[in-house]
Image: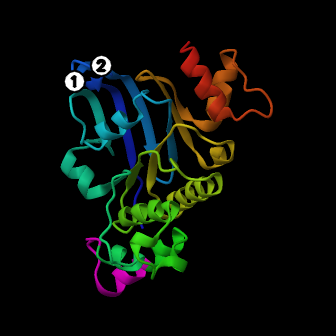
Amino acid sequence: MIGSDYVLEAHNIYHTTEVDTGGCFNGGGQSALVLKGVHLTVHSGEVMAILGSKGSGKRALLDVIARRSDGSSRGQVLLNGAPLTKSLFQQRCGYVTHACDFIPGLTVSQTLHYTPTILGGYLKSSKVRQVLADLALSQVSHKKVENLNISEKRRLAIGIQLVRDPVMLLLDEPTQGLDPLSAYLLISILSNSAKKTGCGILLSLEKPRSDVFPFLDRALFLCLGGAVYSGGTRAMLEYFHGIGFPCPQLENPLMYYLCLSTVDRR
């Protein structure tokens, strides 16, 4: 349980890195500006979605915040007003990618128990049981990790981070490859966990479904590395309506404004 409020801020983020140009003969990429003056703010207990099509800069932004990006960056990333260094990120934050490899032969429960934390003994066991319950993994706690389905593996990867009690948790496309019901379950679980523990959550989504909209407190729309909108989801509807783009009834506002901003950045 997080004992105080935390705020993650990114101000005027620019990032240049090498990108694949898709050439058949040059065998390499070229340097490109993939983030252009991006701002965001996430508070304890909030869920913020980074929305954008492929190549919009979603993963680059997560990597810049996590201090694990290649290339050169400028701008400020702050945690409670202090620069978020790589060491501080590793101590206080977590990052869930798709490259999480589990140790074969271990059960779900054992995988969480063996995750290094400052807790031990009864407190560690209690924390593991709580994370299993929060992530709907209690029923498969004795199942070997190699026998899990993709949804269970994704939630276990999240559990490995949550058992460490991060104040901010970053997730790269957590719903990718999941069926609609599993995607809904995952986002709802993350939202409940954020409210319960006070952990701030920042996740990227490429094809957001309308049923996850109520679980998102903030949204950042990216297009070609630039921010089209960054702020609260309720204010988002008012903002786009105020500039002449009200969301039609029965439309998914997340996908509607994602498509709109991708086609016309104005």
Tell me the SS state at disc 2: loop
Amino acid type, label 2: Gly
Residue segment shown in magenta: 115-128
Is there any visible trace of residue 3 in the rendered image?
Answer: no
Q: Is residue 42 in the magenta section?
A: no
Q: Residue furthest front?
A: 25
Q: Are marks 1 and 2 in contact (CB under 8 Å)?
A: yes
Where residue 189 appears, as percent x and y from the top left, is 56, 61
**Which quarter of the picture shows residue 218?**
top right
Q: Is residue 93 above or below residue 2?
A: above
Going by the image, does 128 lie left or right of 24?
A: right
Going by the image, does 209 lie left or right of 169?
A: right
Amino acid type, label 1: Gly
**Residue at the disc numbered 1:** 28
Tell which of 242 and 136 is nearer to you.
136
Is there any visible trace of residue 94 in the rendered image?
Answer: yes
How packed is label 2: few (under 14 Cα within 10 Å), some, or many (20 or more)?
few
**Residue at the disc numbered 2:** 23
Q: Quadrant of the N terminus?
A: bottom left
